[in-house]
Amino acid sequence: MKKQTLLLIFAIIFMHISTYSQQALWGGQQIISPEINDDNSVTFRLFAPEVTAVQITGDFLPTEKIQTPYGEMDAPGKAELAKDEKGIWSFTTNALTPELYGYSFIVEGLTISDPNNPFLIRDVGTVTNVFIISGEQADLYKVNDIPHGTVAKRWYASSGLDMKRRLTVYTPPGYEQSTEKYPVLYLLHGAGGDEEAWMDLGRTSQIMDNLINQGKAKPMLVVMPNGNVIQDAAPGEGRDGFYKPQFMVSKQMDGTYEENFMDIVNFTENNYKVIADKEHRAIAGLSMGGYHSMHISRYYPNTFDYVGLFSAAFVPRDGVTSKVYENIDETLKSQKENGYKLYWISIGTSDFLYDANQEFKQKLDDLDMNYQYSESEGGHIWRNWRVYLSDFVPLLFK
Amino acid sequence: MKKQTLLLIFAIIFMHISTYSQQALWGGQQIISPEINDDNSVTFRLFAPEVTAVQITGDFLPTEKIQTPYGEMDAPGKAELAKDEKGIWSFTTNALTPELYGYSFIVEGLTISDPNNPFLIRDVGTVTNVFIISGEQADLYKVNDIPHGTVAKRWYASSGLDMKRRLTVYTPPGYEQSTEKYPVLYLLHGAGGDEEAWMDLGRTSQIMDNLINQGKAKPMLVVMPNGNVIQDAAPGEGRDGFYKPQFMVSKQMDGTYEENFMDIVNFTENNYKVIADKEHRAIAGLSMGGYHSMHISRYYPNTFDYVGLFSAAFVPRDGVTSKVYENIDETLKSQKENGYKLYWISIGTSDFLYDANQEFKQKLDDLDMNYQYSESEGGHIWRNWRVYLSDFVPLLFK
């Protein structure tokens, strides 16, 4: 290339890099982090010559016990990085099993993202770096060279809430050209989440593309609404602009969402090529979304043939007055009498909601309601919810 | 609430916060950063008691001269944060004019994101925190309480490139219910960008929603493809998984994209309610995307009635052999003879491509081709490209 061209290219590169330069550009530091080694160990690197200590914390490290005002709890473990003569800190894990992992660095007591890894997922107000170790279950989380569905961020008018609200809609590969009509899974997030959570933390479009391509799941729509009725959209995506997201927002579990849920169903059925009957509607959710799914499916007891409760937050609603919660047993009985195909409950054995889920099972037993129950290891974490989704979806609409 | 409920809620919150805790939870540090004050000054805060120096760098600070192997260049300025007795570092700017701003902290020489601000935009391999000062032009970048279009991430089959490829499609409010057909703007990114750049860095859906709502722009589709022909999708969104994004990828400006561009036009016209004629097609792009727009619009010289070149990278293609670049003057002449409605060139007065754009204007003058030319302050930056888009779109399809 001519010198003039090189100079132009350099100038363009410089414009970008200099804006918020992450590395000493002229030191020639071309750091790769994370680097997944052939044996599935992972090396993390950070160029920080002036710093005296760097640690890493991530869900691939053994947990540590920490003291809290509420007693001893498990917290993600930490490991020390070592510094070389060039000022590059590094740490290599043991061989890791296939999974989507998250991590952060800790520099002088400050938790930071890895400046060499732009792949970040937001959970409530925190962003965390991620990487994937391929194989087994984790292959469902990857974008493989197969047909892909479309993911749309769309707004619907909620007449009940008198608000334009945003939701995420996954339509399966071939949907646009097809003359078929499809079934729908309504997939609900937990407290702290929003209409982006199942896509970003849950890898829903990747899981759906892969399961459909493998013939394990029927092509279906997945509608991911926002369960925080005071929000029109995820933080930063709505009329409230950028603000610090909170874990619990008001009116999350007071019946308002359940009461207005048919706005979402009606919007979907009026706007997409879907089969608008009970046999072709599923509802599932994690934690608060499991709570919502339980209540919505019994409050509209002849609407959903498939219900999935993933680590559902069965929390008492004593202080809340809503007609939604007035006749829980009666509506469950109606749901039973009206019939359904699958009522699915999954929970991790170390989830703090384990006992609450056993109590709820007992209630279903007392009411003589059928359900399918599965336990996994671990607690109240996305790793489990991705697995539960992958296990639940193949059971739908068959 | 009952104690049991409180404990459950605490446990859920703890699960989330502890995973990658950004703050000393038990220290009760509820940091807000950035905080936009009433006078439009902004306060940044960082809780880092163990750290000895914190700076901020951002595009609202005066630039600094730095030395590079290619001579003196402007780099974003820095400011020092001051520490209080609790270990909270802070800095307050002067009153800022309305704009979307970006910033990072520098801790012990290490550039990091603000852990209290989850709003980040990726540019090539770097993520930067952002915030908006409302008013004037910047109000176009906000999500206002108005009708919103839909943004879809969709895959098309490029027969020419033998690849499934991802693109972003903005459809205007009301598109889905409408029986109308719409015009289309093809909007191309620069080197280092991809099908996400115009949405994330360019605020395209917000600009379109706002301009359409104000009656300043016609409702139209905006199709944002990926101009890197070796990629199927943005880094992390395609079959190559997560990897460190590079500024220049191969085959970006060798004619391949231009040669296969009609795959994108055909896909759009076969899949959306659009008017498939020259009068209802516009093409525009920034930097490399301006280069692509110029070449595509003359290589298919009877296809686009509107052409927008934003800080276009008119770089020599001496070493490249492609039939696309063989008959530049002849095809420009054909484009002129076939006629067009608008040929729009915009450039910043301190852009390093300023002279190259003047040379291109001279070429158009020599060929007696009409164009509309506008200059702005500043250089090769997204701040300008958002303005150029906002200025260009109202001129289309009228």
Image: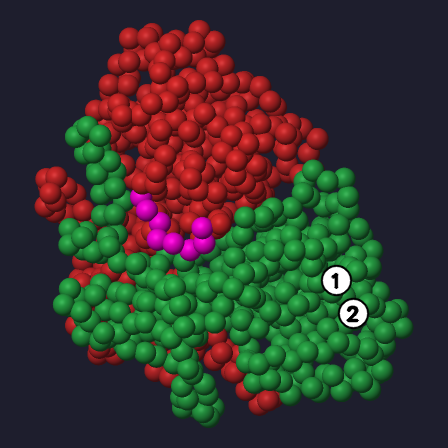
Chain colours: A green, B red
Picture quadrant where residue B79 is located: bottom left
The answer to the question of whether label 2 and label 1 lie on touching residues, with beta carbons closer than 8 A, is yes
Return the residue nearer the eye: B304 or A156.
B304
Instruction: Please name the residue shown 49% across and 68% down the image.
Output: A98
Q: CA distance from mark 2 to mark 1?
A: 8 Å
Q: Quadrant of the N terminus of chain B?
A: bottom right
Q: Residue at x 46, y 93 (%)?
A: A71
Which element is circle 1 on? Answer: loop
Identify the magenta region: B240-247
Q: Position of residue B299 (x, y in %)?
A: 43, 18
Q: Main secondary structure of the magenta part?
A: loop
Q: Which mark is residue A342?
A: 2
Residue plotted at (21% across, 37% down): A11
Image location (x, y in percent) of residue A143 = 52, 53
Chain at numbered mark 2: A
In this rendering, position of residue A50 left or right of residue B248: left
Q: Residue furthest bottom?
A: A71
Q: Which residue is mark 1?
A: A396
Q: Amino acid at mark 1?
A: Leu
Q: Where is residue B269? Give x, y as percent.
A: 60, 28
Q: SS class of the residue under badge 2?
A: strand
